[in-house]
Image: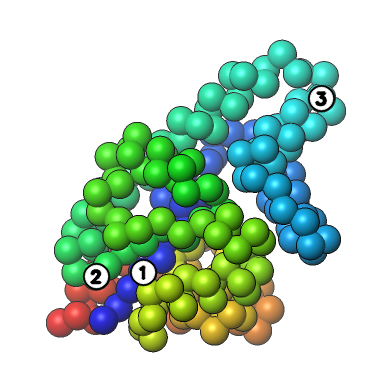
Amino acid sequence: MTVLAFDIFGTILDTSEIIQEFRTKQLEYTWLLTLMGKYMDFEEITKRALMHVLKSHHEEHRFEEELRKWRNLKAYNDAIYLKDISKLVDIYALSNGSVNEVREHLNRNGLLSYFKGIFSAENVKEYKPSPKVYKYFMSSIRDEDAYLVSSNPFDVIGAKNAGMKAIYVNRRNLIVDPLDYEPDVTVRDFEELYKWISNKKG
């Protein structure tokens, strides 16, 4: 049985309205901490990354406003296809965000009921693309036909490196350097993903 593990930020949730320098710093902190063998809660990383960027621009007064934007991210319009996808295969969340944070985002966007469960980097105290995150998911669900679904190239590379299949959602029509790790499937959006699953099941 095919199982899909969806990345959340940038794949289901649209992060284009937030400060991109903040998003880059947020990811940089997760990678740096994991490389150093240290762990910090993702929500704390988010706050520190945001404050660092705002301070560098002397705009600390915008902290609460920008943090509110992060906490209220909207799903992409094609997220409506998650309902149909969930009728064909089991879907899970696999995110750097905490279980509680991901649950709140999915619930706020009316998507939570489609997911069989939420897996987080906090379960292994390392962040994607650490192999531990993907291997934890695979060992938990025990399904050989498990795919990561992500629009973040580093995430696709991380999944493939860990021995997991991967579907790249190429939302921004980017030419990706996969470091010799090609995605198993590339789609433009969730509508195309739904069609692929339908054909696979049929």
Q: Quadrant of the N terminus?
A: bottom left
* Label 3 SS: helix
Where does the image place residue 122, in percent across and percent down from the top left? 58, 55
Q: Amino acid at mark 3?
A: Lys
Q: Are marks 2 and 1 in contact (CB under 8 Å)?
A: yes
Evaluate if marks 3 and 2 touch, with contact meaning CB atoms under 8 Å apart.
Answer: no
Which residue position is annotated with label 3? 55
> Who comes first in sequence, dot 2 or dot 1?
1
* The C terminus lies in quadrant: bottom left
Residue 57 location, quadrant: top right
Give the CA distance from mark 2 to mark 1: 7 Å
The residues bearing labels 3 and 2 have C-alpha atoms spaced at a distance of: 45 Å
The circle drawn on residue 88 is none
The label on residue 4 is 1
- Which of the marked residues, 3 or 1, is nearer the chain's N terminus? 1
Residue 49 visible in the snapshot: yes
The residue to which callout 2 is attached is: 89
Question: Which residue is rendered at x = 54% and y = 84% of the image?
Answer: 163
Q: Amino acid at mark 2?
A: Val
Q: Of helix, strand and loop, which one carries label 1?
A: strand
Protein image colouring: rainbow
- Mark 1 is on which residue type? Leu
Q: Residue at x 50, y 80 (%)?
A: 164
Q: Position of residue 105 (x, y in %)?
A: 41, 39
Find residue 45 and report its horizontal and vertical position in percent.
Answer: 69, 41
